[in-house]
Image (cartoon, grey):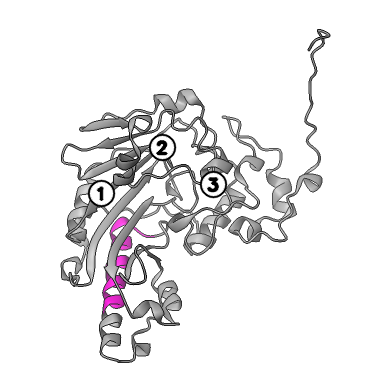
């Protein structure tokens, strides 16, 4: 200052009861699960990298798009240790979102594409293509909301192909790679700090694999097929994986509890004109444990169907879930085209 004096502002953290967030209008899973007693238990804990409980709970934070499914988690992990230190909270969120209990059992893994059944029978007059994504986190690095610039810049992976720094890509190139500006979710959690510094995209030599680096998570692998060959896409993407952060009881970890377990999403694009108008569709999707979003206009009737959860089932089982569900949705569409009744096809809860 001009007088030569310095001023220090002290932030006085008060008691857990005084700091407890107002959750009366909070519609997230965090808002449903967090209690004053649970908050008190986590309040003074801190991970080795400095993540405290108030860093992971996000009152009013709604995670966008497919990643949140029908309800937002309302929380995000700062590092892998967050899931252990704050397990009293995170385990409940994971169970509520994925509809599967966290217990002492190690999550199943199955990368054998030959265990898939019936994926070759998808009706190509309705099914337009498929995409698979895997989210992975690198050992010994904090997650995006808490990592430093140095950590982010050091997150490099030796993959065959071409590396493109996000700052060097023009708008047209970013659109071609399905890249978007930072979402409100990323901005409000701090995951977009210093954007686009140290954000990049790897492209395989044949452009069949895209790897997003530091954009949503440490790594996101994406493979897309326009022939809807689900088995081939599955075989391809899991041939590219290397070891990342994995914890007993939870499986593969990511910053969002909505992605733990497998970190795996299967998306099948299909054309439906009549089924989306049916009042029972949402109930059918819930029973099938699927998520469906419109990816076209009302006139094109193009939708993307994906697995609602990533935890509690193996990679093959999740893929089978989507394949079987898409077959049922297509069958319903065909019946509606003939002015038939689909009520008898409504499945029981999976």
Is residue 350 visible from the viewing direction of this image? no
Which residue is at the front of the view, 29 or 334?
334
Question: Chief secondary structure of the magenta span?
Answer: helix
Label whose residue precedes the other's in the sequence (1 or 2): 2
Dot 3 and dot 1 residues touching (CB under 8 Å): no
Query: Which residue carries the number 2 mark?
Result: 218
What residue occupies the far top of the structure in this picture?
4
Q: In front here: 287 or 112?
A: 287
Where, quadrant-wise, is the C terminus in this rendering?
bottom left
> Mark 1 = which residue?
223
Judge left or right: residue 38 versus residue 8: left
Q: CA distance from mark 1 to mark 2?
A: 17 Å
Of residues 87 and 8, the one nearer the viewer is 8
Q: Nearer the viewer, residue 14 or 305?
A: 305
**Which residue range is magenta in the image?**
313-330
Q: Residues within 10 Å of mark 1 (few under 14, many from 20)?
A: some
Q: Which residue is mark 3?
A: 184
Measuring 21% from the left and 54% from the top, which residue is drawn there? 233
Residue 16 percent location from the top left of the image: 77, 44
Residue 108 picture quarter: bottom left
């Amino acid at each position: 200052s001009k007088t030569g004096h310095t001023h220090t502002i002290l932030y006085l953290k008060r008691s857990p009861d005084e700091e407890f967030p107002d959750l009366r209008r909070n519609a997230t899973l965090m808002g449903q699960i967090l209690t004053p007693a649970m908050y008190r238990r986590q309040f003074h804990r801190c991970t080795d990298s400095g993540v405290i409980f108030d860093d992971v709970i996000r009152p009013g934070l709604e995670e966008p798009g497919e990643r949140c499914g029908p309800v937002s988690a309302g929380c995000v992990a700062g590092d892998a240790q967050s899931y252990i230190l704050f397990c009293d909270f995170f385990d409940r969120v994971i169970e509520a979102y994925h509809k599967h209990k966290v217990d002492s059992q190690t999550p199943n893994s199955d990368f054998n594409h030959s265990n898939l059944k019936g994926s070759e029978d998808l009706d190509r007059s309705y099914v337009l293509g498929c995409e698979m994504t895997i989210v992975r986190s690198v050992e010994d690095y904090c997650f995006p909301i808490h990592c430093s610039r140095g950590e982010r810049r050091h997150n490099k992976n030796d993959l065959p192909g071409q590396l493109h720094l996000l700052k060097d890509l023009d708008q047209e190139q970013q659109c071609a790679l399905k890249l978007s500006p930072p979402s409100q979710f990323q901005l409000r959690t701090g995951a977009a700090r210093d954007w686009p510094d140290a954000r990049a995209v790897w492209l395989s030599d044949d452009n069949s694999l895209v790897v997003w680096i530091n954009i949503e998570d440490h790594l996101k692998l994406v493979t897309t097929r326009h022939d809807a060959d689900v088995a081939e896409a599955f075989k391809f993407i899991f041939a590219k994986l290397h070891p990342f952060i994995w914890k007993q009881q939870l499986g593969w970890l990511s910053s969002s509890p909505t992605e733990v377990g497998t970190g795996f999403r299967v998306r099948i694009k299909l054309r439906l004109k009549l089924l989306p108008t049916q009042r029972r569709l949402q109930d059918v999707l819930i029973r099938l444990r699927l998520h469906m979003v419109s990816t076209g206009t009302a006139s094109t009737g193009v939708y993307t169907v994906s697995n609602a959860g990533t935890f509690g089932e193996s990679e093959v089982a999740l893929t089978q879930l989507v394949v079987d569900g898409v077959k049922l949705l297509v069958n319903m569409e065909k019946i509606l085209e003939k002015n038939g009744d689909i009520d008898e096809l409504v499945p029981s809860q999976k």
